[in-house]
Every structure is written in structure tokens, then in C-alpha cells.
Amino acid sequence: MSFVCGLAGILLFTILAPVAQVVARRAGSPIAPVAILAMAAIVSHAASIALGVMTVEHFRYWNAASVFGFGVMWYVFAFGAVYKSVSLEILLDLAQRPEAAAPLAEIIQRKVPEIFRGRTDILVSGGQVERAGSRFVVTPSGRTTVSRIGALRRAFAIGDTGLYDFAVPFEMAEKTTNS
């Protein structure tokens, strides 16, 4: 029965997470979507564990938690694969055209800058960078984020994945760009 409580938590999470995302977006909330997912996971987990403690005579927390964790991680990985994906944005744009095609030059000149403008807006609204004329400047909060991401990438042995090289410490990258 403890496994069933974990499944109930997954069900609650899969209902609560998208509803919370829609409510936050409509309210113009500055809370990041991933933080909303985390909050939905905490609420769902607490509710499913409370349900288990109250209804199952020999409740096994770790059985419920493992099932819940698996389901939530599956959801988060799927969410991450489609959230702000540049490739999917291009694919969706192509699919919505009557001929379902566009010249590469048009995609590069029109769609890619639009996507990256949206990304820079996210960085600005998140306090990671500031606009300084026609340039962007990393804020102290952005420096902290870069440092944390670099540490996580090193901890997971990710290194340079092609687009971003967080293997180089931020201070070294800053010295290189200022030289």
C-alpha cells in the first residue's frame, strides 16, 4: 500500500504542476517554472506521505518516496526536454507554416534571434544580467549562478558540451574577455 501512496503523490503532482504553471504565468509571477515544479513536488510529496501515514497501518516511507521520486523525475526530465528548447521552437515554427518548410537563411535571420532575445529577457528579468547600452553585464547574482553551475558541471563531470564551457572558472573567463 505504501507504493500506492507514492502513485497518489505522482497523480497529485501531475495535476498540480501544470495548474500551478498556468496560474503563475497568468498572474505574471516572477517565480521560475522550475521553482514552481519544486514547490508542486514538495506539496504533493507531503500530501501523499500524510495520506500514507493516516491510512496505511505499516506505512513504508521509502517505498512511497521511491515511487514518487521516480514519477516526479520522469515528469521533470520531460518538462526540461521541451521547455525553452531552441530545436523545438524551430520545429514548431516550421510545422505551423502552410508549406511546413522555410529556407535556412530565413530561420537563422528571423527565428533564432527571436528565440535568443527571449532568452536574454529571461536573464534580465531573473537578475542574472543587466543591460548597459547595447551590451549585457553579468550581475553579482549572475556571477554566483555561474559559479554554482560550474561547480555542478564539474561535480557531474560534464565539462564542455559544445555550446557552453563551464569548465573554465568564471574569474578566468572574465580576465580573458577584459584583456
Image (spheres, rainbow, N blue to C red):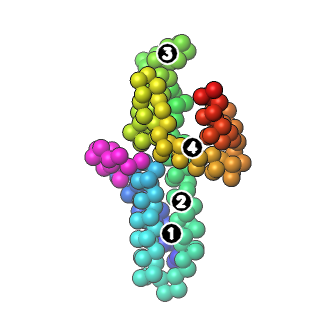
Amino acid type of the residue that numbered disc 4 sits on in the rendered structure: Val
Q: CA distance from mark 1 to mark 4?
A: 35 Å
Dot 2, crowdedness within 10 Å: few (<14), some or many (≥20)?
A: some
| Total numbered labels | 4
Residue matched to label 1: 6
Residue matched to label 4: 146
Q: What mark, if any, has residue 71 been given in the picture?
A: 2
Residue located at (52% from left, 31% from top)? 86
Q: Position of residue 24 (x, y in %)?
A: 33, 49
Tag 4 or tag 1, which sits nearer the N-term?
Answer: 1
For the question of whether residue 158 can be seen, the reply is yes
Tag 2 or tag 4, which sits nearer the N-term?
Answer: 2
For the question of whether residue 93 can be seen, the reply is no
Tag 3 or tag 4, which sits nearer the N-term?
Answer: 3
Dot 4, crowdedness within 10 Å: few (<14), some or many (≥20)?
A: some
Q: Is residue 4 above or below residue 107?
A: below
Q: Secondary structure at mark 2?
A: helix
Residue 116 is a magenta residue: no
- In the image, which residues are magenta? 20-32
Amino acid type of the residue that numbered disc 3 sits on in the rendered structure: Gln
Q: Secondary structure at mark 3?
A: helix
Q: CA distance from mark 2 to mark 1?
A: 9 Å
Q: Residue furthest front?
A: 179
Q: Are marks 2 and 1 in contact (CB under 8 Å)?
A: yes
Please identify, in this view, whether the residue under mark 1 or under mark 3 is nearer the observer: 3
